[in-house]
Amino acid sequence: MTRRVAILISGGGSNMAALLDSMTGDHPARPCLVLSNDAQAGGLEKAAARGVPVAVVDHRPFGGDRARFEAAVNSELDRAGAEIVCLAGFMRILTPGFVARWRGRMLNIHPSLLPKYPGLDTHARALAAGDAEAGCTVHEVTAELDAGPILGQARVRVAPDDTPDSLAARVLAQEHILYPAVLRRFAGGDRRPVLLP
């Protein structure tokens, strides 16, 4: 049975594009919606060009009422028949109520080797700590930020001359490999972590 996947974005959607491009052939899932909280998000154009339905739920008119905003997002997800939700650069903190509704069916990608460096500025923090390696993690979303069960990790060696930007670029390249690999396994009912060297 093919699973229906919705992807939530706020920006250019490079991880979204990698996910969309992976859901072909014998993949156990297909995209049903790309949704953004920003009508100017570049990823919407990329999704539409691939023939994937798009929607916008702008958070600003809700004036900080996160529950009403999330109710509008859920309406779009329900209308699309979404079964799995992938966060791909969606820059809104989700309430416990929203997370509970999608428990066990919502994934996120984070640019660090969790549990190290949850939150922001992950690459600068890894460099400041003198880490020999960095990377990215795909995890199930739980109410606690960046703390859900780990479904995959990819590692990147830190170079002596790395800056946060140069490290981020190499990690992003691995994100585009890891996230599709995890989604394929997860949509097929397998939650064993994908570990890339």
Image (spheres, rainbow, N blue to C red):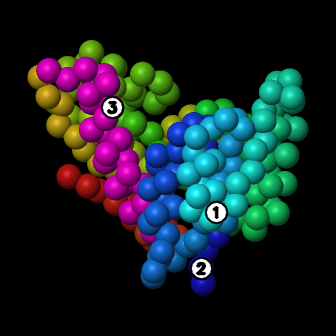
The numbered disc on residue 2 is: 2
CB atoms of marks 3 and 2 within 8 Å: no
* Horizontal side of residue 11 vs 92, given as left or right: left
- Location of residue 161 with respect to 25 vertically, above or below: above
Q: Residues within 10 Å of mark 2 (few under 14, many from 20)?
A: few
Q: Which segment is the magenta one?
A: 161-184
Residue wearing tag 1: 52
Task: State the quadrant of the N terminus.
Answer: bottom right
- Residue 192 in the image: x percent, y percent? 39, 65
Q: Nearer the viewer, mark 1 or mark 3?
A: 1
- The amino acid type found where label 3 is placed reads Ala
* Horizontal side of residue 99 vs 116, given as left or right: right
Secondary structure under badge 1? loop
- The amino acid type found where label 1 is placed reads Val
Q: Earlier in the sequence, mark 1 or mark 3?
A: 1
Measure the alpha-carbon separation of dots 3 and 2: 33 Å
* Horizontal side of residue 68 vs 166, given as left or right: right
- Location of residue 149 with respect to 146 vertically, above or below: below
**Which of the 4 image quarters holds residue 142?**
top right
Magenta: main secondary structure: helix
> Which residue occupies 45% across, 80% down?
25
Residue wearing tag 3: 168
> Quick one: which residue is furthest to the top in this view?
128
Measure the alpha-carbon separation of dots 1 and 3: 28 Å
Q: Nearer the viewer, mark 1 or mark 2?
A: 1
- The amino acid type found where label 2 is placed reads Thr
